[in-house]
Image (tube, rainbow, N blue to C red):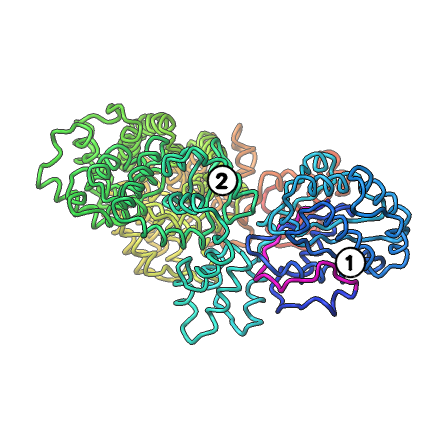
Amino acid sequence: MTTLPLSSLSTPSRQPSVTPPELRSRIPLRPRTTISRPRLLTMLDDADPSVVTLVTAPAGSGKTTLLVDWIGADERARAGSVAWLTVEESDNDVAHLRSSVVSAFEHAGSHELSEAMARVPSPAGPPGSFGALLVEALDTVDGPVTLILDDAHLLHDDDALSLLGNFLRWPPRTVRTVLAGRFEPPLALQKLRLDGRVHDISPAAIAFTADEAAAMLARTGTVLAEDDLSKLMVRTEGWAAGLRLAGMTLTGARPPSEVIDAFTGTQHTVADYLVGEVLSNLPPHVRTFLIETSVPDWFTADLAEKLTGDRRCQDIIDGLLAQNFLVDRIPGPETGYRYHPLMRGYLRAEIARLGAEQIRNLERVTSSWFTDTRHPLFALQHSVHAADCTRIVDILSESGLGMVLRGDGPQVLDAVEQSPADVRRDVRTGLVSAAALLATGRIAPAVSILSALRRSGDGLGDPRAEVLRRALDLHASLYTGTVATPLDRALRVGIGQSGSPDLDAYASMVAGLAELHLGRRAAADVHLSDAVAHAQAGHLHLTALTCLATIAGSHFLASQLTDAHTAAHDALHYSRTHGLTGSPVHAVAQSVELLVGIVRLTPADAAPDDVWRAICTSPDLAIASYGRRARWALGASDEPGRSAPSERDRADLERPALPGFEALLAPMIQRRYLAQGELHRAAEFVDLTARRLGPVGEVHLLAAELHRRAGRLDAADAELTRVIDGTKRCLNPVNSIRALLAAAAVAVERKNPTRAFDSTVAALTAAQPESILLPFAEAGTTVRDVLTHNHGRFGLLEPFADLARASVPHSGAGVDRSPNAALTRRELELLRELPSWRTAEQIAADHFVSVNTIKTHLRGIYRKLEVRSRRDAIAAAHELGLL
C-alpha cells in the first residue's frame, strides 16, 4: 500500500460514478500542472503492488490527470483491467457503496471480471457475507486488476469505512486498490503500515521542485529570474495550487518581481481560492481558531488555548491535520504547528476584523507565552506589534544581549527600529543596540551610541548596565586600536562577576580578545576560558565556539602548534555537536588547523580556499579582515592570476589586527610584493608594520630582507643581529626562526660557513620541538645547501634536518615558491624506499596502506622533485642530500 499526498490544482469536473477503461478518451485533461512524470513514477515504483493511497493537498486537483498519467505508464495497469469509481456522498450508504463497487468492476472492460461480478450476491443482501463473496469472486480472475476510488475522503459512514477497511486488509490476490482524496479517510491503516504494506509519500516529498515550477510556468509563457523563482518557492513551498495561481497573476504586464512581492494570502485570486476551496466548509469556531492562532509564526496547543480560550484546541488541530489542511506539524519537545505562508497571509489580513484592541491583546498573550517558554526574540517581536513599551524594554534588558550573542542581532535592530520613540530613548535599549551593531559590523553607529551614553552618564546607577557599557567600549576599541585604556576601565568595574551568564560571557570574551591584542596571552587565556564556562551555562554556543577558536589561535600565535591543533580540534567538535558548522567561526577554527599544517608543511583536511572564503563572509569586520588578509598572503585567492593586492587587501592592512598573527603574515606579504617587483610597496610595508606593531623584531627582519636583496649585506646583518641577540624580540616565534635562517643566508653570501652553520643549527633547535618547517621552505636553496653540505653534523637534530632539507623546493625558486610544494613526512619516508627497487605493492604491504596510496605519494614526489621516473627521483634525492 502506498500513501501518496499529492499537491494538485483546481477541482476537475465531476466524473461519472463509474469510469470505463478508455480513460484517456473519457477524462478531460487539464494543462499539465503535476509534478514531473519521472519523479512520480519513481515514487510509485517503490510502492507495494496491492494497495495505493493517493492523498491530495487541500482543495487540490489534477489527481485525475495524475492517475491517468500513471495508469498509462504502468505496465501492470495496461496489461490488466482498470475499475474506476468516483466516490460521492451517497456512497456513505453501504448498499449504495456495494453497488457502485460492483458496477465499477463490471465496467472495467474485462469479460472475465464481468462474469466474476455476476457471482456476487445482490448488494442489498446480508451485510456479513458480501465482502467475503466479493473477494472470492475476484480471486477467480487471473489478470491484474486496478481499482481506483477517487475522492475517497468523502467516505465517513462507519459501516462504509468498515466494508472498505476489511477489503484492504484481506485483498484479493490480483487486485491493487488506489485510494485518492484530499485526505486519508479514517480507515485504521496502522496495522497494514506495521506489516510494510503501506508506503507513505508526504506532501513535502511531492511538492513541486524549483525546476518543476519553472517548467510549469514556462508552459504559460512565464520565465522567471532565479531570484524571483526562489522567492516564489518560499511563498508557495511548492504547493501546486499556489504556483498555478501565481502563474495566473504573472501573465500581466507588471514586472514579475513586483507581482511576486504582492503575491500573498491577501492577493484576490489567492484569497478567493482559499475561501472558496479551503475555508468555506469549516465551522465558525474553527475559522475563529484559525484567525486567532495566526498571530504567531508558529504555535503549540497550549499557546492556541491561551489565544482562543478554547479547551478543544488539540481536537481542532488534529481535525485540521486529518483533513490535510494547510498546516504543518513541527516536531520538538512540545509539538508545534505552522500555517502555510499563503494561508497565514490571508488569516493575518482577516484578523483586522477583530479590532485594534483585541489584536493588541492577542499580541500581548503571545509575547507573554514566548517569554515564559524562553523564546525572547519572538516575545520581543510580538511586544513590538503590541506597542507595549514597558515589556519591550524589559525583554531587551533581560535577554537582549543573549539574543545578540546567539546571532539574532539584525532581528533585534529591526525590532528596536519598529518600537515607539520612548523605547529607543531608553539607556538599556541603547546598550543592546550598540551590541547588535558591533556584532553586525556597523562600528560607526555603535561608537556614536556609546559616546552619547558616555556623555549623558545615564545608567551608571545600574551595576550590570555599567559593566555592559564598559565591555561595549572595549569591544569597539578593538576596531580602533586604542585597547589598553578601555581594558583597564572594564577590569575596574569587574569582569565576569555580574551573575548573568550572558553578560559575563560577553565581557570575559571581549577582555580576552583585548588581552590577546596587547600580547598578554596568559591573561587572555584566563578570560577566554571563563567566557567559555559562562557561555555554556547560558547556552550561548556561538559565543563559546568563538572563545574556543580564539584559544586555539592563541596557542598557534605562541607556536604551540600541538596545543593549537588539539584546541582547534576541540572547537570543531563543539561546533559539530551544536550545529554551528555553517558559521564563519567554525571556519576560523578550521583555519587554525590549516595554519598549523602550513607551518608544519602537512596537508590540511579542509580545502584552504573554502575556509578563507567562509571566514570572509563574517559580519564581524575583524574576522572578515583576518580571512581576506590570510587568503591573500598565503596565495589562496580564488581569482585566477591575481597576485597584486586589491584596494580592499590594502585597506585590511590599515585595520587593527592581532599583532602575533599580523607578525606571522608580514614576511609573507613582503615576499609577495617582492615577487611582483613592487619594491616601493615592500619598503612602504616596513614602515606600515612599524606603525602597527611598534619597534619589534619583525620590523628589522623585513628591513634586513630589503637590504639583502639590494646587496647591502652589512646592513642586513646588523638588522638581523638585533633580532637574534634579543635586542628586538619577535612577536611571533616563527619569525625568530626566519631571522636565524636569513642570517645563515647572509653568512653564506659573506663567505662565512661557520656562522651559516651555527645559525642553521640554532634555527633547527628552535623549530624541532614543534616541527616548524615553513621557514626552511621559504629560505630557499641557500639554506638547503648549508643543510646538504653539513649532512651528518647535526647530531640529534639530524632527522629533523633531513625534513628541513626536503622541505625546500627543488626548483631553486626558494623564497617565491609555495610551501605546499615541499615533501611531506610520508613522501620523505617513501623517497627513502626508492633505492630498494621494491615494487609499489611490496612497499604498500610493509606500510599497511593501499597500492593506490603509494602511487599517489610517488606522483607527488616526482612532481615536487621535477622528475619523471624513479631513477631520476633517486638521483635528485642524492643531489639534494635527502638520501
Q: Amino acid at mark 2?
A: Ile
Q: Nearer the viewer, residue 31 or 742?
A: 31
Q: Secondary structure at mark 2?
A: helix
Image position of 78 with respect to 419: above or below: below
Residue 681's x, y, as percent?
A: 31, 59
Report if residue 40 lies within the magenta region.
no
The quarter of the picture where the N terminus appears is top right
Range of the magenta residues?
3-21
- The dot on residue 562 is none
Counting other residues with Cα less than 10 Å from the Cα at mark 2, is it few (<14), some (14-19), or many (20 or more)?
A: many
* Number of numbered markers: 2
Report if residue 19 lies within the magenta region.
yes
The quarter of the picture where the C terminus appears is top right
Q: Nearer the viewer, residue 439 or 169?
A: 169
Label whose residue precedes the other's in the sequence (2 or 1): 1
Image position of 443 with respect to 725: above or below: below
Q: Is residue 486 left or right of residue 822?
A: left
Residue 785's x, y, as percent?
A: 51, 45
Residue 442's x, y, as percent?
A: 26, 50
Res. 403 in view = yes
Q: Is residue 205 left or right of residue 86?
A: left
Identify the residue at the far bottom of this view.
253
Task: Give the residue at mark 2.
Answer: 317
Q: Is residue 716 left or right of residue 48?
A: left
Residue 658's x, y, as percent?
A: 31, 41
Q: Amino acid at mark 1?
A: Asp
Task: Give the residue at mark 1.
Answer: 74
**Is most of the magenta stretch helix, strand or loop?**
loop
Do the CB atoms of the residues marked 2 and 1 lie less than 8 Å apart? Answer: no
Q: Nearer the viewer, mark 2 or mark 1?
A: 2
